[in-house]
Image (tube, helix red, strand yellow):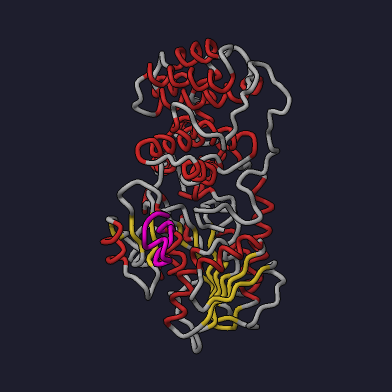
Amino acid sequence: MTDSSVPPGGHRSGRGPRKRDDKRRSGPPRGRQGPNRPPTGDPAREAALDTLRAVREDAAYANLVLPSLLRERRISGRDAALATELAYGACRAQGLLDAVIGACVDRPLDGLDGVVLDTLRLGTQQLLRTRIPPHAAVGAAVELVRARAGSRPTGFVNAVLRKVAEHDEAAWVERLAPSDDLGRLAFTHAHPRWIAEVFARALGGEEELAAALAADDTRPAVHLAARPGEISAEELAAITGGEESPYSPYGVLLTEGGDPGDLAPVREGLAVVQDEGSQLVALLATRAPVDGEDTRWLDLCAGPGGKAVMLGALVAIEGGTLDAVDRAPHRARLVEQATEGLPVRVHTGDARELALPETAYDRVLVDAPCTGLGALRRRPEARWRRQPDDVAELTALQRELLRAGLERTRPGGVVTYATCSPHPDETAAVVAAVAAETGAEVLDTPGLLPEVPDTALPDGAPGLQLWPHRHGTDAMYAAVLRKR
C-alpha cells in the first residue's frame, strides 16, 4: 500500500530479525526504564531515545511509536518538536551516524550495549545535524545514559561524543565517504548505496540524483485531503491556517506544527492526513474516460483507507458504490472507520481470490504493496531495513494483483496501478509485463494529469512518476490500463 501514515499491510518495511538485548552484550548493563515509563528531566530526549530503542529492539516504526509516546506523556509544543526532530533525524541518518561513531570507537558497534548505542546515535545527530550547541548535546547525552545505565558508561559516551564534535558533518563526510560520485552522494544524504542506484535508474541518470537524495533526507510537510462533497480545499485551508496544495484540488499543506489529528476537520471526518501524491493517484484513477456505466468502482488494496475515502466520496457524487478490499482485518477496520457514511462496502480477504458483489467493475485501483522507497521521508528507519532481495518477492505479488485487477474489470473499463516506490522493477516493468500478457492498453498516464509537470518516465516507459524534489510529494508511481 502507498498511504504514508501506516506501513503496508502484510509487508513490514523491515523484514530482518527482531533484535533484543535479552543477553548482556559488552558494555554497561541496560537500564530498566521502558518506553512507557514517564520521562524525568528531559522529556523530549527521553521520548526520542525510547523511540530509537523500540526501532532497534522491536523492529518498530518510528512514525507510530513516537506519536504514541508524545500523547501518553503529554509532551507538546517545543518539546514535541525537538523529540520529533531528534528521533526521526537519527533514524533517517543512521548509516551516516554509525560510520562517524565507528570512526570514534575501538570496537564494533554491535558490541556496544543497546542503550549506549542509541544514546551515541542521538548525540551524534545533535552534534552534526542540528543547531544544538555541542556542550548541550554532549551533556544531555551523558545525563541520558546515566539515568538509563548508571554512571559507568558516562565517561565512554562523553569521550566518544567529544571526538565526534571535533569535526562538523561536512568534514566527516570528506573523511569517510566513498570516493566514487554515486557512493559519495548516497553517504552524504544518508542513503544505502543500493537505494541511490535505484533512484539513478528511475531518474534516467545521475544528473538529478543529488537533488532527489537531498529531498529524501528532509522531514516532509504534512498534507491534508479535503473530503469531496463535504468541504473544499479553500475552506479547509482557512480553518487550519494551511495553504492549498499546488496540484491536488483537494489538498492542503499545513504550515504550522502540532498533531494534525487534533484539528477539528480531521476529528470530524471532513479531512484526512494524506500526502498530495496519494491524492493525485486517487484522482488519476477517476480521470480516464470509460464508455457507458461508471458507477461500480473497486479499491483492491484499500487499507488504511485514505484513497478509499476520496474514491468513495467521488463515486457517491456519481450515484455509485465502491468496494474496498484488504486482507488484514485490522486494516479493513481502519477502512470502515475512515469511510463511514460513504457508499463503501469493505471486504476482508485476499484480493486475488475473494468473491465480491460485482463480477466486473468500471474502475479499479490496485495500490499494491511495495518496498515503500517512495516514502522514506515518512518512514525514517525503512531505508536501513529494506534490502535488494525484498524486491523480487514483491514484484511477483504486484504482477498477480494487477492481473487480478484486470480480471475484475469489464471490457472498456480501466485499472490504475500504483506503488509508493520509484523502483523500475516495481513500476514500469510490472505494467509492461502484465500488459503484454493480458493485451491491456496502457494509456498516456501523464496526459491524464496535465496540471502536474515533469512526470514522464525516461525512455518512454509506461506510467508517471512523482518525486519529492520535483513535486514535493512522495515518490509515487502510477499507470492507467484499459481492458480491451
Residue 182 visible (yes or no): no
In the depicted view, which residue is nearer to us: 484 or 237? 237
In the depicted view, which residue is nearer to us: 107 or 443? 107
Residue in the image at 64% along x and 72% along y: 347
Residue in the image at 53% along x and 62% along y: 418
Where residue 287 sits: x, y (%)?
A: 43, 74
| Residue 269 is covered by the magenta coloring | yes
Total number of numbered labels? 0
Left or right: 425 as drawn, with respect to 73: right
Q: Is residue 202 above or below residue 301?
A: above
Where residue 97 sits: x, y (%)?
A: 50, 26
Where residue 89 sits: x, y (%)?
A: 45, 35
Q: Quadrant of residue 262?
A: bottom left
Find the magenta span and give its range.
261-276
Residue 235 visible (yes or no): yes
Q: Residue furthest bottom?
A: 292
| Residue 349 is covered by the magenta coloring | no
Q: Is residue 189 above or below residue 461?
A: above
Where residue 171 sits: x, y (%)?
A: 40, 19
The quadrant in which the C terminus is found is bottom right
Residue in the image at 37% along x and 76% along y: 229
In the depicted view, which residue is nearer to us: 252 or 236? 236
Q: Is residue 309 above or below residue 246?
A: below
The quadrant in which the N terminus is found is bottom right
